[in-house]
Image: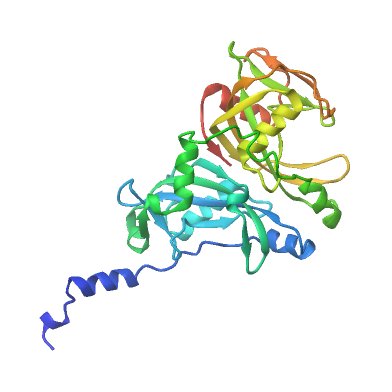
C-alpha cells in the first residue's frame, strides 16, 4: 500500500476527528441525593445542579457533553457551587485557576422537572455558570453545538437579558405549594439537607435598601424565603416579598448564587443554603408589618445607616450596593 493510500482523505479525517470526541464525565449524581432518596422514597426531591457554559471557537457555539448537553453535575453536600464548577472544568482538562466564573442563570420549577431512572422524580435547581472559552490542549476533545440548540443556554440568555414575561408572583398562584422542608423533615429528622432559597435586593426611589429582620434568628437580611418544588426563583422571591411586606416587585439582575453557608437552627435542624439572590424593582404596594410574625422588623435604609449585618448578609448586601458581581460560591 502506498503512502498516498495510507493518508486519510477529508471525509475519513472528519470521521476520525468525530471518533476523538469522547463523552464528557458530566451528569454526576451526588451521594447526598442518593442518601436522601433512600430515606424519602416517594417524594419529588430538590436537586441543586451546576452546568458549565463554555464558549467554543466563537461565541455562537458552546461546549457540550456526549449527550449534547452542557457539562453538569449534581452538587454534593458539604461542598459548593463553585467547587462543583471547578470540578467540571478539571474533567475537561481546563485549568480552572485561570478562568473567571460567574453565574448567568438560576433555573427551576415545573418546566425542569424530570424523572430519573436511578432516583425517581426530581426538581432540579440549575445554576448555569459561565466559565470563559474552551481552548488549549483540551479543545480538540470537546464537541460544540450552536448555542441556540442547547436548552439551558437559551434559558440562561433569556434570564441574563431580563426576558421574563408576566408577574412572577401570580403566574403559579393556582398550583398548591405545600411545605417541602416540613415533609422531608418528617422522614429524616434534623439531618443536614440543601435548602433552596430565593430573595431580592430592592431599593426605593431614594436609593434606600429594604431590609427585614427574622424574628427567631434576629438577623437582618434582604427579603426572601424557601423555594417550593413548583417555583422558579423569581416566583419564590416575589411571593415571599408579597407575603411578608405586601409589596409587589419585578425580579431582575442576578446578583449571586451562594452555597457555602451552613446553619443549625435552635430546634436542631441543619441546612446548607442554596441562595439565589436577585435585584428587584418595585411595582406597587405599601410596606406593612408581616402578618405571619416571621419578620418582626423591616425598613428602608441608606447605605451609611444599615442595621447590623452578619455573615453571609454583609457580603451579599455589599455586592448589591456596589454593583459588583454576579458571584458564585
Q: Is residue 13 left or right of residue 287?
A: left
Occupied quadrant, residue 304: top right
Q: Residue at x 16, y 82 (%)?
A: 6
Q: Nearer the viewer, residue 320 or 163?
A: 163
Image quarter hosting the N terminus: bottom left
Residue lying at the far right of the rendered structure: 267
Q: Residue at x 48, y 45 (%)?
A: 155
Q: Indicate the position of residue 146 as horizontal and vertical percent values.
A: 35, 53
Above or below, 181 against 243 in this view is: below
Q: Is residue 177 left or right of residue 9?
A: right
Q: Indicate the position of residue 315 as horizontal and vertical percent values.
A: 62, 29
Q: Residue at x 59, y 10 (%)?
A: 206
Can residue 245 be seen here? The reply is: yes
Q: Nearer the viewer, residue 149 or 253?
A: 149
Task: Tally the numbered discs.
Answer: 0
Occupied quadrant, residue 262: top right
Occupied quadrant, residue 238: top right
Above or below, 145 against 157 in this view is: below
Q: Residue at x 61, y 62 (%)?
A: 29
Above or below, 101 against 277 in this view is: below
Residue lying at the far top of the rendered structure: 206
Image quarter hosting the C terminus: top right
Q: Indicate the position of residue 52 as horizontal and vertical percent values.
A: 48, 51
Q: Is residue 328 left or right of residue 228?
A: left
Q: Indicate the position of residue 3 as horizontal and vertical percent values.
A: 12, 82
Q: Nearer the viewer, residue 292 or 64?
A: 292
Can residue 312 be seen here? The reply is: no
Amino acid at each position: 500500500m502506498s503512502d498516498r493510500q495510507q493518508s486519510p482523505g477529508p471525509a475519513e479525517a472528519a470521521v476520525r476527528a468525530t471518533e476523538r470526541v469522547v463523552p464528557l464525565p458530566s451528569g454526576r449524581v451526588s451521594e447526598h441525593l442518593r442518601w436522601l432518596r433512600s430515606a424519602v422514597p416517594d417524594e419529588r426531591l430538590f436537586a441543586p445542579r451546576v452546568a458549565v457554559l463554555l464558549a467554543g471557537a466563537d461565541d455562537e457555539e458552546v461546549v457540550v457533553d456526549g449527550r449534547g448537553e452542557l457539562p453538569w453535575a449534581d452538587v454534593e453536600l458539604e461542598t459548593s457551587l463553585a467547587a462543583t464548577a471547578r470540578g467540571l472544568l478539571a474533567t475537561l482538562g481546563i485549568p480552572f485557576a485561570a478562568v473567571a466564573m460567574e453565574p448567568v442563570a438560576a433555573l427551576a420549577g415545573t418546566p425542569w422537572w424530570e424523572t430519573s431512572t436511578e432516583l425517581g422524580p426530581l426538581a432540579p435547581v440549575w445554576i448555569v455558570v459561565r466559565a470563559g472559552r474552551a481552548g488549549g490542549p483540551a479543545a480538540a476533545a470537546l464537541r460544540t453545538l450552536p448555542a441556540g440548540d442547547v436548552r439551558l443556554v437559551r434559558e440562561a440568555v433569556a434570564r441574563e437579558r431580563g426576558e421574563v414575561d408576566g408577574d412572577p408572583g401570580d403566574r403559579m398562584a393556582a398550583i398548591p405549594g405545600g411545605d417541602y422542608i416540613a415533609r422531608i423533615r418528617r422522614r429524616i429528622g434534623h439531618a443536614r439537607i440543601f435548602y433552596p432559597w430565593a430573595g431580592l435586593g430592592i431599593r426605593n426611589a431614594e436609593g434606600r435598601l429594604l431590609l427585614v429582620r427574622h424574628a427567631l434568628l434576629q438577623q437582618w437580611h434582604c427579603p426572601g424565603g424557601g423555594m417550593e418544588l413548583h417555583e422558579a426563583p423569581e416566583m419564590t422571591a416575589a411571593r415571599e416579598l408579597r407575603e411578608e411586606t405586601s409589596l409587589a416587585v419585578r425580579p431582575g439582575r442576578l446578583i449571586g448564587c451562594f452555597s457555602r453557608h451552613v446553619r443549625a437552627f435552635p430546634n436542631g435542624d441543619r441546612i446548607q443554603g442554596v441562595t439565589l439572590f436577585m435585584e428587584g424593582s418595585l411595582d406597587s404596594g405599601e410596606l406593612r408589618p408581616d402578618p405571619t410574625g416571621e419578620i418582626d422588623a423591616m425598613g428602608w435604609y441608606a447605605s451609611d445607616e444599615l442595621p447590623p449585618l452578619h455573615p453571609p448578609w454583609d457580603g451579599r448586601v455589599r455586592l448589591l450596593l456596589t454593583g459588583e458581581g454576579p458571584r458564585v460560591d
